[in-house]
Image (cartoon, helix red, strand yellow):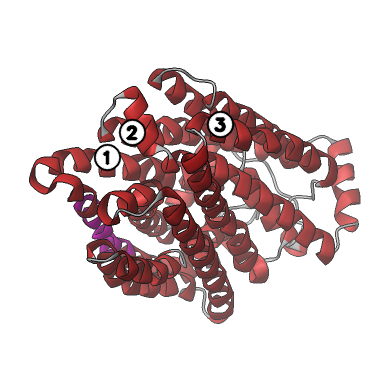
Amino acid sequence: MNGDGMREERKEGREITPAYANYVLGVLFTVYVINFIDRQVLAVFIGPVKEEFGVSDTAMGLLVGFAFALFYTFAGIPIARWADRGNRRSIIAVGLAVWSAMTAVCGLTVSFVQLALARVGVGVGEAAGSPPAHSLISDYFPPEKRATALGIYAWGVYVGSALAYLGGGYLRTYFDWRTAFLCLGIPGLAFALLVRLTVREPPRGYSERGAGPAHETTFRETLRHLLGSRSWTYLVAGSCFLSLTGYGVLMWGYEFFGRIHGMSPVEIGVWMGLIVGLGGSGGTYLGGVLSDRLGGRDPSWYMRLSAIVSLIGIPFAFAFLLAGSSRMSLACFFPYYVLSNMYVPAMFTINQNLAKLRMRATAAAILLFIVNIVGAGMGPFLVGLLNDLYADRYGIEAIRYSLVTLATTGVLGALCFYASSRHLVEDLGRRLTNADRG
């Protein structure tokens, strides 16, 4: 960064107050809500889109999974490298405008291929969302408050998904899927201006006043640094296992309740919206608060807590998927969703804490690259593929056993989180004693 840029950052940094930091967190949270509304609404319309274009569940799994996730993750790396050098606020604003416009374009498509290409465009735009946002939040909030702040930011997944289910259920009943995409894409364009005009770019490492100047690093240096931490590799592996089921449920849960329990679109939208919105947000908030409290005494508790709650959640997952009635299924879905999302703040926080200052956006992109390829890409695709493979044996109930198959990976995720906790203190100590600290 040139001298003028650094002087501007220092000037803005002196003006940052706790109230303004919370305002920025609120704005970034809202961006993430819009992100997941635009991403998740397609899950509500899997049935109508499949029927209109005459495709299989496997094809729909590709559309809601890899068509989005593959380009989302690959675009995330160069965009994050840009964010580690440039103005993160402006990058987020541009990305929001792009993915909002492409969401509206989805509503104008007339073939399955065109819809898939439009979803690629949504994914490329959304790649500019979380990596620079994680980096900004890490500069606005110190390490002892970071898990809570990132946990609040992570609410965007659940609030956005909830609003997509609630609004999508209504739109599916009274309108068509094209109307939904047109209605949801336009508001994001206006909000992009708010981001650009009201969010300031703080100095790198502002929340860690003693961190010293940060030198720029290459992608290879960032990757080597992260892979050198055994706690990070176990963290990523565990997150991948948990995200397989998480994204599988997010994208196919609406169809599950319709096919298995015969619930109406509006009824599914209301219940999915409430459980995903309240359960997911509550789980991430609780996970963030407990992680900050326990991790402040012993950092290994960040991942130890994640291992415990993830393991406790697995029986609720089986009960929710195998229950014979919709009421029992919904009653078990809620605690499962709370527990299965408590690891998210620790995942984001440890990833940021292990990274150096000028690595943070890239570190976030690397984490999201791996987790989203496996979770957002592979999870929905595997459910669709297993639906078709199980169809001859289980008929319409194939989706039940597809999701159960994915839920078993939660055990492996919990074991990986525990392994991460055993190396975390050592790896964090190594990060803090690096000479350049950048």
Which quadrant holds residue 62?
Answer: top left
Q: Is residue 429 above or below residue 60?
A: below
Res. 208 in view: yes
Which quadrant holds residue 314?
Answer: bottom left
Q: Nearer the viewer, mark 3 or mark 2?
A: 3
Q: Any mark on residue 60, and which?
A: 2
CB of mark 3 within 8 Å of CB of mark 2? no
CB of mark 1 within 8 Å of CB of mark 2? yes
- Percent x, y for residue 313? 34, 70
Q: Which residue of the protein is positioned furthest toward the left in this rendering?
A: 393
Q: How many marks?
A: 3
Q: Toward the viewer: 357 or 92?
A: 92
Which quadrant holds residue 92?
Answer: top right
Q: What residue is shown with label 1?
A: 384
Q: Write the start and end of the magenta stretch as one range.
A: 401-413
Q: Toward the viewer: 322 or 427?
A: 322
Q: Residue, x 73% and y 51% (percent of image)? A: 27
Q: Nearer the viewer, mark 3 or mark 1?
A: 3
Q: What residue is shown with label 3?
A: 179
Which kind of residue does numbered mark 2 sit on? Met
Which kind of residue does numbered mark 1 sit on? Gly
Left or right, 429 with respect to 8, comes to: left
The secondary structure making up most of the magenta span is: helix
